[in-house]
Amino acid sequence: MDSSITAPDPLSAVPVSNIKKSSKGYLPQLDSIRAFLIFGVLLSHFAGENFASAGIIAIIFFFVLSGFLITQILLKSRYRDDLSGTSRVHSIKQFYVRRFLRIFPIYYILLAVLFTVNFQTTRHDIFWYLTYTSNILYYINNNFMGLLSHTWSLSVEEQFYILWPFFMFFLPRKYLLPVMIAAIVTAPIFRAILYSNYLATGDSFLLTVLTPSCMDAFGLGGILAYFRLENKEAFSFKSILSKVFLIICLIFFVMLMIPDGILSNILSSFINFGIVQLFFIRLLIAVFAFYVIAKASIGFKGVLKIILESSALRFIGKISYGMYLYHPFMYVIYKKLGLPMFSNVFITFCIYSSMTIIVSTLSWYIIEKPLNGLKKYFAYD
């Protein structure tokens, strides 16, 4: 038997109280963060190209959030297994079953419907969608393909779910943090190399759809989980240094995201600004997401606490996966119903967003929530 599976782990130095608190603690503000993120995605798709950056920012936030939540789940499971002497193989099986129950059902139901009606290229490219590799398909073709193009990020997430547990469960403890740091460092370099050596004149966004291109966001989320689990006080962010750090991030974030801004014009005189965008801006967004998620995991205070803990936002956060999956098809449904079309962006956004919420709510109560209830049979401990 592999001793690395059941041998005591240095993570056992973590106070038991830390693990118990975090294992019981529901973080309601993170659900509300999800709500804001999914509205960012809807804004980018329903309100025109002027809001495209909202979707990009939201996806990066989602990746950091996934990195945080998944890493925390995995490390807590690893710790409990080491304390109890349980094989980590059991926990990794439980993890995959629980992910299956949450993600696969409505995804494959949607694919089955689209395959049946022969929607766009679904039948032709069904292999890529079934295997969660549509991001690779889009990269190979250098083109997003129809209303299923948003599945690229779901493919990235699923590929992360497949690989990351093996690192978190089976790597020696001393290598966990270096692996996360390596993910953060290598991802922007990977993006920049792709841009400078391949498709330099094409759509640079397609160079960010491969999983290695997104690992800086996942890695930052992982580091947040790693230190929060070991020392929750490390993320109180009360020091002067953290405030200065946040201000610097916000300044650069705003300056670099302004279309045709002064800074971009200055930089483009010296270097390829496309590389700067791929190398720097996306990492900067991920760092900002790190800060927001860290604060939300502890709990914002005051007015932000009231907003982020509202039941309406938390519910939108719960159904956000369905909203992301279904939202591109609202236009098709609306048109099939023969309803009047509007040129006003605000009206269009409100109509399609409302439809998305209705469909996703039905999906939640009819399919997702009942299946989520089965998770109790696949507990980690």
Image (tube, rainbow, N blue to C red):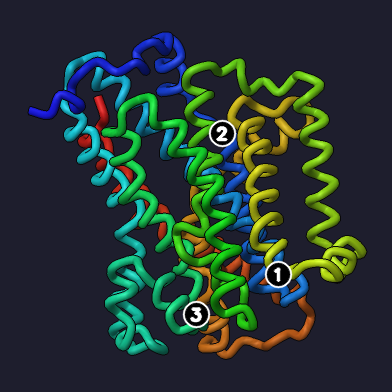
Residue located beneath label 3 in the image = 147
The picture places residue 93, in percent across and down from the top left corner, at: 20, 40
User: Which residue sits furthest left?
Assistant: 1
Mark 3 closeness class: few <14, some 14–19, many ≥20 residues within 10 Å? some
**Point 68% across, 87% down: residue:** 341
Residue 205 visible in the shown view: no
Q: Secondary structure at mark 3?
A: helix
The amino acid at mark 2 is Pro
- As drawn, the label of residue 28 is 2
The picture places residue 333, in percent across and down from the top left corner, at: 51, 81
**Point 47% across, 38% down: residue:** 180
The numbered mark, 2 or 1, whose residue comes first in the sequence reads 2
Q: Tell which of 48 and 89 is nearer to you.
A: 89
- Distance of label 1 from label 3 (alpha carbons): 26 Å
The numbered mark, 2 or 3, whose residue comes first in the sequence reads 2
Q: Secondary structure at mark 1?
A: helix
The numbered mark, 1 or 3, whose residue comes first in the sequence reads 3
